[in-house]
Image (spheres, rainbow, N blue to C red):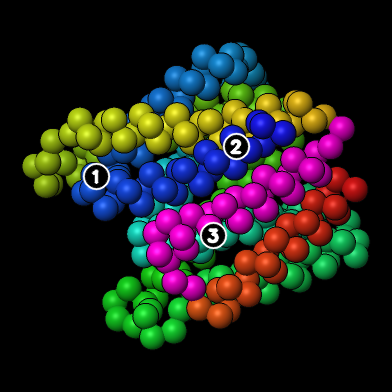
Amino acid sequence: MHFLFFSVLCSVLVSVQLKLAQRRGIDTGQAIAWNYAIAALLCGWLFDPPLASLREPQAPLLSLIALALLLPTIFLAMAASVRVAGIVRTDVAQRLSLVLSLIAAFVLFGETADAWKIGGLALGLLAIVCIVVRNGPASSGAAGPARWLLPLVVLLGYASVDILLKRIAAAGTPFAASLLFAFIGAFIVMALLQGWQQLRRQRAPTWTALLAGLLLGATNFGNILFYVRAHQALPDNPAVVFSMMNIGVVVLGTLVGVWGFGERLGRLNKLGIPLAIVAIALIAVSLHG
């Protein structure tokens, strides 16, 4: 179970690092770019991906390219959501993306519905409404719409990533190879974006952003690594790994956001957290029961 604990910890630490980087004036765009560089190196070193599979005729190149473009876009949205909406709502929105993934499984992959799935889906949709709703008067002003829009973008983005990964897996491409392709592609996208922005701003890369990015990349990849190791350590209990991972991130993210950073939640936001936990548990039972 220690792999599961470290995976949850790394997931929440990604949001914490983004929050701290913003407070210290570190360019998060540069940090995110370097994050993908170190994640790609760690992926190639620790997973030893079979790159020959990417050259096979059935390799889903369009889905792989779409994944490489989507990853940095969602990471930037996540950084903005952590800044504006807070760690709690961002992490819960990220984990509730599995609700939209479940809808996609019905529509795109022909998965059948049962009582557990329908119940988890209904509670999950209700939890999404509660989490993204604006937090009363504090949401007024220019940042008001962003407080609910950015968590929603995070939710939609991670659901899209999950759908792309399912399509890539269905084509027979090994997970490690697709992950390395996506990390390298995401780094190229971010490097081009940063180069263009620096030409406009005349702002050079900084050592602080590099160091923050290396730490962010190690933590980001650690989340994936420990999650895979948890499944390998508990091969007969995928529901336990799936549910504890997602519920753990919701709970720990809430504790860190509220107690560590003093984030304030409205009544509906607070209601959304237990709804999200129950929804995740129901979906875990339905997917692995």
User: How many residues crowd around disc 2 within 10 Å: few (fewer than 14), some, or many (20 or more)?
Assistant: many
User: Mark 2 = which residue?
Assistant: 7
Residue kind at label 2, given as amino acid type: Ser
Query: Which is nearer the eye, 195 or 253?
Result: 253
| Residue at the image point whose x is 52% and y is 71% from the top | 132
Q: Is residue 233 magenta?
A: no
Does residue 184 appear in this view?
no
Q: Residue at x 48, y 21 (%)?
A: 42
Nearer to us: label 2 or label 1:
2
Three-letter amino acid code of the residue under disc 3: Thr
> Would you say 130 lies left or right of 276 here?
left
The residue labelled by disc 3 is: 254
Name which residue lies at 67% across and 32% down: 2
Taking the view exactly as shown, the residue that stands out farthest to the bottom is 137
Kind of element beneath mark 1: loop
The residue under label 1 is: 27
Q: Amino acid at mark 1?
A: Asp
Q: Cβ–Cβ below 8 Å for labels 2 and 3? A: no
